[in-house]
Amino acid sequence: MIEDLLNQTITVAKRTGNDGKGHYTYGTPKEYRARVEHKPRLVRTSSGDGLTNRFEKVSNARIFVDRTASVEIGDQIILPDGSVPIILLVAPQYDLDGQLAYWRVDV
């Protein structure tokens, strides 16, 4: 059902480590089907102040990514327009049968 809406392509490179100078290193990029919606939203990230363990941040876009994708916070994501935003939140979305339907990524 959602597959019909995933009419764009994003590129994801998994974070593999650190280069020793404070910069992340990334693996081989892979392309995935996705849908990018540019709309500011307030999201609660999983890292925070220790008391609530949450920060509220403004997401500039929400990306719906095919369930076969592997996306985590810290990975590099390249949008169809060539921009490389920071991943704020990755949340699995399930269908009515409890199966993974797609990933929701806020950047």
Image (tube, rainbow, N blue to C red):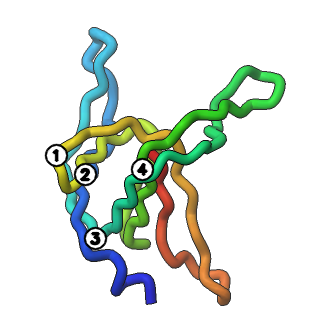
User: How many residues crowd around disc 4 within 10 Å: few (fewer than 14), some, or many (20 or more)?
Assistant: some
For label 3, the crowd category at 10 Å Cα-Cα, with few meaning under 14, some 14 to 19 and many 20 or more, is: some
Q: Residues within 10 Å of mark 1 (few under 14, many from 20)?
A: few
Q: Amino acid at mark 2?
A: Leu
**Where is mark 3, residue-wise?**
33
Residue furthest top in the image: 21
- Tag of residue 79: 2
Mark-to-mark CA distance, 3 and 2: 11 Å
Classify 24 as above or below 97.
above
**Residue that badge 4 annotates:** 61
In x, y percent, where is residue 12?
27, 51
Residue pointed to by mark 1: 82
For the residues bearing labels 4 and 2, Cβ distance under 8 angstroms:
yes
| Residue 70 is at least partly visible in this image | no
**How far is disc 4 from disc 2 in space, using C-alphas?**
10 Å
**Amino acid type at image mark 4:** Ala
